[in-house]
Image: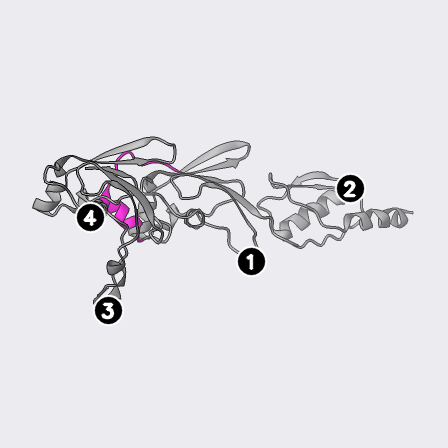
Amino acid sequence: GVQTCALPILADLSREYLVLVDGTVGFPLVGTIKVEGLSTAKLTKLLSQRYAAFIKRPVITIGLVTPRPVKIAVAGEVKTPGSYTLSMEQGQKFPSVTDLIEKAGGLTATADVAKVQVRRQFQDKQQVITLNLWELYYKGDQSQNITLRDGDAIIVPTASEINAFNVSQLANANFGININEEIHVAVIGEVSHPGTYKLTPDQSQSSAVTNGSPAKRQPPTITRAIQTAGGIKPLADVRKIQVRRLTRTGEVQVIDVNLWNLLQQGSIQQDLVQIGRAHV
């Protein structure tokens, strides 16, 4: 009698089960079980123990049919913030923080990569993990480039101050600023031809070769924008140039620039990467 009763139950059990976002699976008879973090061997043992109360000497075989798509949100100072769904193949590694930033089009020039946050739900509580991607860039510290989980959210904050050297470095990082596209800038004030212009990376720099290696590409700068607008007029005060740029939150960031220091001292820090509106 036991065998005849058990056979229909076993037939019902032999099917595919969906792992939910919270890492649980609902099984007949034994109810909901948390499978997140368990190997197939451990889950097999656990189910055998649970079904032993209903089936004499249960034989459990488990295999992963299709990995769940990973859904991760990216917000803040990236080119295309939003929610990204990644189809995971068997054996494929989960993406890292820089993988998702790169997928979101890279960073903006106002990104603060020293304070990138990953927000994660863990045991019904939100974890906030703060990462410094400069440690990854300069020292190769992979602990700052953690592997992401389904449901994570990456937040790239806005830098309180713009450092031209840092922006230049991020232009060379694979997860950094995308400099392959033209940008739109407005140049107004004491220049020969005020107006809105399209600027592209300096092709002469990108094609130059130094010691057998191509020169690193750099985004357009303030001086490039002024040159494109026909140069300054005689009454222009290059000590008080302003760069106004919008952050991802819609706030206007005003940066005071003294190009006289660039002319007199070679201070390239004053020749900021240009992605906004310049007043001369």
Q: Which mark is residue 212?
A: 3
On the image, numbered disc 4 is attached to which residue?
Answer: 227
**In the image, what residue type sits under mark 4?**
Gln
On the image, numbered disc 1 is attached to which residue?
Answer: 91
Q: How crowded is mark 4: few (under 14 residues within 10 Å), some or many (20 or more)?
A: few
On the image, numbered disc 2 is attached to which residue?
Answer: 53
Q: Which residue is drawn at 30% across and 52% down?
A: 200
Question: Disc 1 and disc 3: Cα gap in Å?
Answer: 39 Å
Q: Which of marks 4 and 1 is nearer the N terminus?
A: 1
Q: Which residue is more in the foreground, 69 or 231?
A: 231
Q: Which residue is more in the foreground, 17 or 270?
A: 270
Q: Which of marks 3 and 4 is nearer the N terminus?
A: 3
Q: Nearer the viewer, mark 4 or mark 2?
A: 4
Q: Which residue is drawn at 85% across and 50% down?
A: 7
Question: Disc 2 and disc 3: Cα gap in Å?
Answer: 72 Å
The residue most toward the left is 264
**Residues in magenta, as a range:** 155-172
Q: Is mark 2 on a helix, strand or loop?
A: loop
Q: Nearer the viewer, mark 2 or mark 3?
A: 3
Question: Disc 2 and disc 1: Cα gap in Å?
Answer: 34 Å
**Residue 190 in the image: x percent, y percent?**
17, 37
Image quarter of the C terminus: top left
Quarter occupied by residue 272 = top left
**In the image, what residue type sits under mark 1?**
Gly
